Image (cartoon, rainbow, N blue to C red):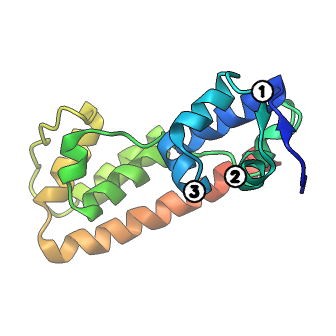
Amino acid sequence: MNEHPQRVTDDVAKALERCAENLSISEFSRVTGVRIELLRRFINRQVGIIRAETWGKIYPHIKPFLVDPQEPPKNPRIGSPYRRHPELVAMVSDQKVLLDVIDVLSPAKRQEALAILGSGVPKAAPTTYKSLSSEENKLMGAYLALPDDQRDLRLRKLVAMGVEEIRKSRRELLG
C-alpha cells in the first residue's frame, strides 16, 4: 500500500463516491474512521491531497471501485440499499430479515414466498406500513398472521430461498 499522500484524481473521487453509495457515507465513515465531512470534501474534490494516514484507512475500501469500469466489482451489491424509515426501525428483527429476503427474490420466487407464508392459514389482511410496497405489505400481513411457532420455520425456509437466489445472482454477475 502507498506510504505517501494520494492526489484526489477523478478516478479516486469516483471510487470514493461509489463506495459511499454502496455503504452509505455514514457507514463508510464508521468503518474507515474518517469523518463524514472529510469524505465529502474528497468526493467533491474540495481537497486535492489525501494524507498518507487517511489514505491507508480509505484505500482498502475503495480498491474494488478503482478497477476498470468495464470490469465488475469483486463483491457487487445484491438487493436494495438500506431504507431509513421510523416504521422499519420499529420492526422486530425477523420482520427486517423477511424484507431483506423478499428484496433479493425474483418476482416468481416472491409469489412462491407468499404461498409459503399463506399455506395452512386463513387469508391474512395486508399490513398498512407506509414504507412498504403493496407486495411487501401482503407478505408482511401473511407472516404476522402465522402462529408464532410457524413464523420461525417458514422464515428459515424463505432465508434458504434467498441465500440460493443470492448465490445464483453472484454466479451470473461474476461469470
What's the residue type where badge 3 is placed?
A: Val
Q: Could you tell me how far apart the alpha carbons at marks 1 and 2 are, in whole angstroms? A: 36 Å
Q: Residue at x 16, y 38 (%)?
A: 129
Residue at the far bottom in the pictured view: 149
Dot 1 corresponds to which residue? 48
Nearest-to-viewer mark from 2 and 3:
3
Residue nearest the observer in this picture, 156 or 69: 69
Residue nearest the observer in this picture, 147 or 80: 80
Left or right: 99 with respect to 88?
right
Left or right: 119 with respect to 169?
left
Residue 31 has which mark? 3
What's the residue type where badge 1 is placed?
A: Gly
Dot 2 corresponds to which residue? 170
Of the two numbered discs 1 and 3 on the same chain, state the one appearing first in sequence. 3
Quarter of the N terminus within the rendering: bottom right
SS class, disc 1: loop
